[in-house]
Amino acid sequence: MFFTRLPFWRICEVPAVYFKRVVPLWPLAGWLTGGIMAGVLWLAAQVFPLSVAWILAIVSRLLVTGCLHEDGLADFCDGFGGGTTREKVLSIMKDSHIGTYGVIGLVVYFLLLTQASHLGLENLLPIVVVADVWSKMCAAHIICFLPYCRKAEEAKIQTIYDRMTWQERLLCIAAGLVPVLVFLPHTLLPALLAPMAVCALLMLLMKQRIGGYTGDCCGATFLIAEMSFYLCCLALL
């Protein structure tokens, strides 16, 4: 319900308080969104060249998620690129209008993402799922190390996530590891370190610039971490 536009709300109504504890389940959402991408990629590759099939797979996630993460990346680039003080960074990120840094950030992101088609269909199919799930697992840990920067009423989603308990962290890590163990070739295991390092560096940047995180920071962290995984896989292969 939170990470996609799929009509799960038709099945049941979830009280808003439960969304405070949704973070440990982010990797499970990655199973869904990554799985949809892999399915569209495979089907489209039966008809189109791989480069076209990969773009269609990317578009499928954009449609399913409503560009939730990409909106966060654009706001993150605008805020951290144009803001000189903590207050200015937070103010820019809250503004719904996109600026120069946001546009450039999205253009560079999608230009790099389309290059993942060079991995080849056989490699790309499992990597798509692992990249989504593993990167969401890494990004989820942002709430364990940083405080939320705003008050609940100032948040875009009117919710501040609860910090994960150790049991929830184990669940989150396990959900992220399963596709790694099932799908990822052993030769690509070193690529798992890239999202972890990127998340750590971004958290240091957030702590230094704004003293914590926002929802936009979470979306940007996920996409940048995922991109680092794809680039590392390309380098390894």
Image (cartoon, grey):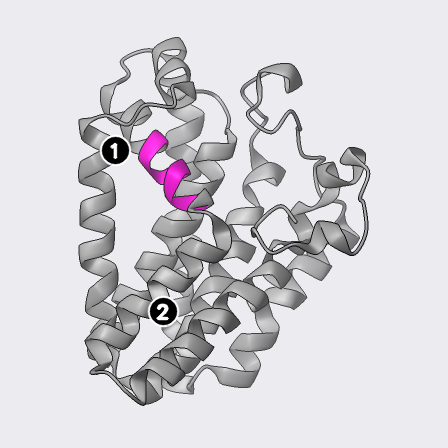
The percent coordinates of residue 42 (x first, y second) are 39, 84
Magenta includes 71? yes
Which residue lies under the disc numbered 2?
57
Mark 1 against mark 2, which lies toward the viewer?
2
Q: Secondary structure at mark 1?
A: helix
Which residue corresponds to mark 1?
102
Chain part drawn in magenta:
69-75
Residue drawn at the location 49% of the way across and 57% of the way down: 64
- Magenta span dominant secondary structure: helix
In depth, the one of 54 and 155 nearer the eye is 54
Residue 184 in the figure: left or right of residue 17: left
Q: Residue at x 65, y 19 (%)?
A: 152
Q: Which badge, 1 or 2, is on the more N-terminal residue?
A: 2
Quarter where residue 170 is shown: bottom right
Work out whether residue 200 can be spotted.
no
Relative to 19, 74 lies left or right: left
Q: Can you name the residue that lies furthest to the front here? A: 10
Give residue 237's position: percent from left, percent from top.
23, 81
Quadrant housing residue 217: top left
Look at label 2 and name its amino acid: Ala
